[in-house]
Image (spheres, coloured by chain):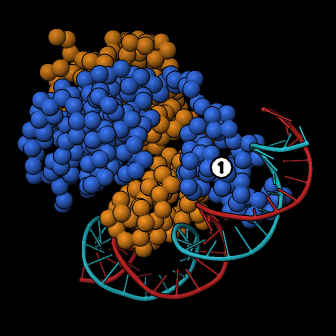
Chain colours: A blue, B orange, C cyan, D red
Amino acid sequence: MNKIRVAIAEDNNLLACSIQEKLELFDTDIQFKYRAANSRELLEMLEKDHTVDAILMDIEMPEMDGIEGTRAVKKKYPQIKIVMLTVFDDEEKIFQSIQAGANGYLLKDEKPDKIHEGIRMIMNGGAPMSPTIAAKSLNLLRNPIVEEESLQKEEFALTNRQVEVLGQLSQGLDYQQISENLFISPATVRKHIENIYEKLHVHNKMQAVQKAQKNRII
Amino acid sequence: MNKIRVAIAEDNNLLACSIQEKLELFDTDIQFKYRAANSRELLEMLEKDHTVDAILMDIEMPEMDGIEGTRAVKKKYPQIKIVMLTVFDDEEKIFQSIQAGANGYLLKDEKPDKIHEGIRMIMNGGAPMSPTIAAKSLNLLRNPIVEEESLQKEEFALTNRQVEVLGQLSQGLDYQQISENLFISPATVRKHIENIYEKLHVHNKMQAVQKAQKNRII
DNA sequence: TAATCAATACGGCATCTGCCCTAAGTTGTA
DNA sequence: TACAACTTAGGGCAGATGCCGTATTGATTA
């Protein structure tokens, strides 16, 4: 079996080295790839070499933090697993990390074998979580946070017709079927969709629908 | 330090004995109190003697199941910690259990020391969760509750690779980009997607991703 | 009044996608 | 040890899609 290729994003040099050392105790099944000092650096490194299976991501980092970084990495490389590794365990950070797509959440004071176990766990589709984190995430599930943000369609200034077309798109209908549903020509549907793409800054149906759903437009 | 007093609610006698035996391996810090064959029996027993710290609760039980039981126990004795212990790991059950107030969720095939660790974890305010359960609860946090339309999910029996491809699809990536991320040929990506369509009974990317999201496959 | 924009509609074209085919190597299971 | 399933890979083809034009009509606005 191939080794699990791991990268680290961590601004504190000492801590990064310490984690790296811990990982290298398990060099039979883990291969350390590289370290970045913040998310932007990580993205640049991934650009050159994205042969990485898992990333240990610090949350607090200068320039671009781990939550933004997780969002960005997951968007481009959704197959890469991300474990948040941090000293803080407040619910807000946990929730944001999970929303950003993190696959696990460990506290930095975990013992080496726990970190190692977590990495193997994540590659098997599990979610490593420190016990206190797990308890807090259960809290979150019990008392759902009411998000006050949800940007609404005004942000993107979509017209009613465009929202309507997006709704049809999200059902997996093609231009022909949408045109029949809305009693317009397929050519018009295509034009509407072109305009939607421009407003949402996307380039295909899937991205448009995902963005629309994320922003509660549909 | 006092021993942790544990009760079990489990209708299957063999399984109950097996768990009890597993626990008695750790009789230095665990004291087994009693076993109930369903939640109603458990409540009666608690009525007489509620000097119990933790309960291992089966979900599927006749008369009164573990989820109702958890709700009832937590209402009367909120200090008692409850670990769901079951063979099933579908998200609906997990979510219901958590809503009912469960403090942890372990699969029955966990090794004895994991169950023991879980009990100690729960008494320290942590939340023991089997890795696959943890991953599913993260899913629940990522995607707010959906109508109970069709939450079978395992019914579709998608392979890991297929789920991975679905994840890439949902980001709006095309076959070429997906093939680069996964280091396979675009032809293979197309084949994977064909197979996904067949399993999900859909005919295009959007329908596949929407169905996968609705069923929490991704 | 002129300008802007939404909604409608059409044509072209390169690329992408869905669907059909075959096929080989691997893994897991009965 | 067979058999099934998964993963990999490729060819071919019709139709769908993304993107570039253009154009008319009506409503709103500066």
Q: Position of residue B135 (x, y in %)?
A: 38, 40
On screen, residue A216 versus residue A29, left or right, reads right
Going 37% across and 71% down the picture, which residue do you hit?
B185
* Residue A152 sits in quarter: top right
Q: How many numbered dots are placed on residues in this image? A: 1
> In this picture, is A31 found above or below B28?
below
- Residue A14 in view: yes
Q: Position of residue A122 (x, y in %)?
A: 29, 45
Is residue D25 or residue A60 the one in the foreground?
D25
Going 46% across and 18% down the picture, which residue do you hit?
B73
* Chain label for disc 1: A
> In this picture, is B102 found above or below B14?
above
Is residue A27 or residue B183 the one in the foreground?
B183
> In this picture, is A206 found above or below A43?
below
Quadrant where the image shows the N terminus of chain B: top left
Q: Position of residue A157 (x, y in %)?
A: 68, 38
Going 9% across and 49% down the picture, which residue do you hit?
A27
* Residue A172 sits in quarter: bottom right
Q: Position of residue A156 (x, y in %)?
A: 63, 38
Going 33% across and 15% down the picture, which residue do you hit?
B52
Residue annotated with mark 1: A196
* Label 1: element kind: helix
Amino acid at pointer 1: Ile
- Label 1 crowd bin: few (<14), some (14–19), many (20+), radius 10 Å: many
* Residue B148 sits in quarter: top right
- Residue B215 in view: no
On screen, residue B85 versus residue C15, left or right, reads left
On screen, residue B16 versus residue A116, left or right, reads right
